[in-house]
Amino acid sequence: MTMGRERSRSVGRPARISREDIADAALEIGLHAATVKTIAGRLGVDHSSLYRHVKGRDDIVFAAADRAIATLDWERETDDWRDYIHAAAEAVWELYNCNPGLAAAMRNMDKTPPAGIRAFSRACRYLEAEGFDTEDAALIMDSVMDMTSDSASMWERLRREDADGTIAERLKASWQSGADDQTAAHVRVMGAVIEGNPKDWWRKKLLLLIGGAATLLETRSSGSNTSQKEK
């Protein structure tokens, strides 16, 4: 995600930066490639200047993730909770797609950015208004976001290339190397998945989770109606 800012050091005056500037610069560079040195260079300051605002690279990544999540435009005016979840998940997928390294960073963090907590809570409150109880709403959104983060970070990793080719190529070869009459059909499916558009497979997983959420709501409703009739 590019913020479109151009910064330069003023002659005779040190550049003024903030924690937000540092986070934005990290996102502009890409969290997969951003270092304290590259961020300082982009901002036109000495790297020691960054430590007045952040504790280190992990703190920069945390601040950048919080800034990125705060930009999400995912809430929809809809009466269909399925569409709501789908829109939220699509927005997060695109956020990861536009910010290389963000999905992996989110999986490795030992704390959740405040913007993420607020967005999660808003989504849960929407589902509660649609009939889900608090725990089920949290279970659904946590499952959807976990799956999206895992899928995005995994696919980004698979596309990395080194002297031996891509990880995806080696992964596909490992599936094919052990194929026999019993496994061949499943190996072909997974080979096509590894070679194909990652978003297509992710969307199928998303639909599976949304279908499970619908079953959960139906089961809870049926149980509630049964209890009321018994009374």
Image (tube, helix red, strand yellow):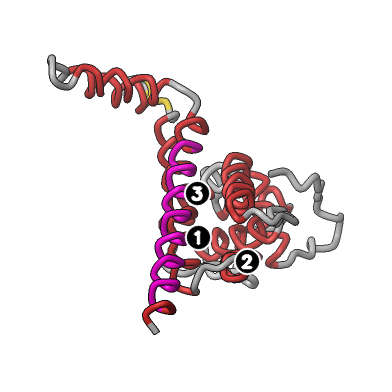
Closer to the N terminus: mark 3 or mark 2?
A: 3
Q: Can you say whether 45 is above or below 5 in the image?
A: below
Residue at 48% in and 44% down: 206
The residue under label 3 is 103
Residue at 40% in and 62% down: 219
Q: Can you say whether 155 is above or below 196 in the image?
A: below
Q: Can you say whether 102 is above or below 69 in the image?
A: above
- For the question of whether residue 149 can be seen, the reply is no
Q: CA distance from mark 1 to mark 3?
A: 16 Å
Disc 1 crowd rating (10 Å Cα; few below 14, some 14-19, many 20+) is: many
The residue under label 1 is 141
Which numbered disc, 3 or 2, marks the residue closer to the eye? 2
Range of residues picked out in magenta: 203-227
Image quarter hosting the N terminus: top right
Which numbered disc, 1 or 3, marks the residue closer to the eye? 1
Q: Position of residue 138 (x, y in %)?
A: 48, 67
Residue 165 occupies quadrant: top left
Q: Are marks 1 and 3 in contact (CB under 8 Å)?
A: no
Q: Position of residue 144 (x, y in %)?
A: 48, 53
Camera-nearest residue between 101 and 75:
75
Disc 2 crowd rating (10 Å Cα; few below 14, some 14-19, many 20+) is: some
Q: Position of residue 147 (x, y in %)?
A: 43, 49
Q: CA distance from mark 3 to mark 2?
A: 24 Å
Image quarter hosting the C terminus: bottom left
Say which amino acid is labelled 2.
Answer: Tyr
Say which amino acid is labelled 1.
Answer: Met
Q: Can you say whether 160 is above or below 131 in the image?
A: above
Closer to the N terminus: mark 2 or mark 1?
A: 2
Residue at 20% in and 17% down: 184
Mark 1 residue element:
helix
Residue at 80% in and 44% down: 4
Say which amino acid is labelled 3.
Answer: Ala
